[in-house]
Image (spheres, helix red, strand yellow):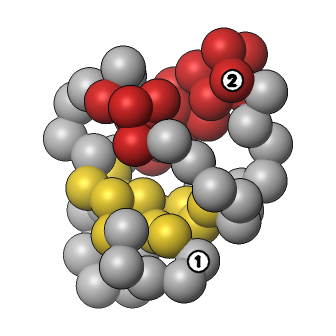
Amino acid sequence: MAIRVAWDRNPVSVHGEKTELQFLIEHLRSNHYFTKHSLIMPDRENDEEAVLFLYAPCDPRWIKEVM
């Protein structure tokens, strides 16, 4: 998976293909009960990607499990 996470932003932004981000959300929800995120939206900076925002603390290891 080619997911990029901007940990230095508030809220944290996650960039990647829409299907990858959907899979990530499902993984976070089912394995870590993480539900504080935005909807997946088109990325204004890169037309080929999508973006979502994380509104609660998220352990970076949870995202690495998917990559």
The single residue placed furthest to the left in the displayed view is 2
Q: CA distance from mark 2 to mark 1?
A: 19 Å
Residue 21 placed where, x, y %? 48, 41
Residue 55 or 18: which is nearer the viewer? 55
In the image, taking residue 39 as reference, residue 58 lies left or right, namely left
Q: Nearer the viewer, residue 64 or 47?
A: 64
The residue identified by callout 2 is 32
Q: Residues within 10 Å of mark 1 (few under 14, many from 20)?
A: some
Tag 2–tag 1 contact (CB < 8 Å): no
Q: Is residue 28 above or below residue 35?
A: above
Specify whether 29 is left or right of 66. right
Going by the image, does 58 lie left or right of 64? right
30, above or below 9, in the image: above
Q: The residue under label 1 is which amino acid type?
A: Pro
Label 1 element class: loop
Disc ID at residue 38: none
Q: Which mark is residue 11?
A: 1
Residue type for callout 2: His
Q: Mark 2 falls on what kind of element? A: helix
* Residue 42 visible to the viewer: no
Dot 2, crowdedness within 10 Å: few (<14), some or many (≥20)?
few
The residue at the point 31 percent across, 30 percent down is 64
Residue at horizontal 27 percent and vertical 46 percent from the top = 3
